[in-house]
Image: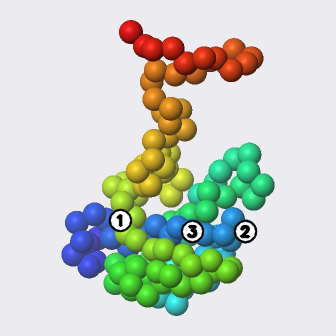
Amino acid sequence: ENENSLPMGSTGRRVFVGNLAYSVSWQDLKDHMRQCGEVLHCDIMREPNTAMGSKGCGIVEFASASSAKRAIQDMTDSMLKGRPIFVREDREERGGSGKGERRDARFGRPERGERFGRARSRSYSGGRQRWQPVG
């Protein structure tokens, strides 16, 4: 199962693609990445309640780790629908369906609920509250 002697299963064959135009579909991304080798799976990360429903990034799984490596080297800064994309190794340890939660961890950003820290109330009071020192 370790076709290219990589220790992480499909992870060595998967790449993360960022800076996608929101209009890019999984088929557009698959067609673009096919230049580097056989694409087994392609997924655009969704962002509900946005105009196009896209987060502007996706995951591509290749048939071989060498194709994934080629994509990282050759496709970074290539143009897709008018935008230069970036490609790097997918850092998520587990394979799965490509629809994993906590994808924002890839950017080093906190998830939505943690963005403002723990000191801020998460309840909505109907108006703006003044900040008060905690403690």
Name the image quarter holding residue 127: top right
Write the residue at 36% across / 60% down.
91
Q: Eyeballing the image, is 11 above or below 30?
A: above
Reading the chain from its start, which is encountered first: label 1 or label 2? 1
Say which residue label 1 marks: 11
Mark 3–mark 2 distance (CA, rounded to whole Å): 11 Å
Percent position of residue 53, x then y: 71, 55
Which residue carries the number 3 mark? 19
Q: Position of residue 19 (x, y in %)?
A: 57, 68
Real-space Cα distance between discs 1 and 3?
21 Å
Which residue sits at x=50%, y=45%? 101
Label 2 neighbour load within 10 Å: few <14, some 14-19, many 20+? few
Q: Residues within 10 Å of mark 3 (few under 14, many from 20)?
A: some
Question: Residue at image x 37%, y 69%?
Answer: 89
Q: Which residue is mark 2?
A: 23
Q: Amino acid at mark 2?
A: Ser
Q: Nearer the viewer, mark 1 or mark 2?
A: 2
Q: Left or right: where does residue 55 sit relative to residue 70? A: right
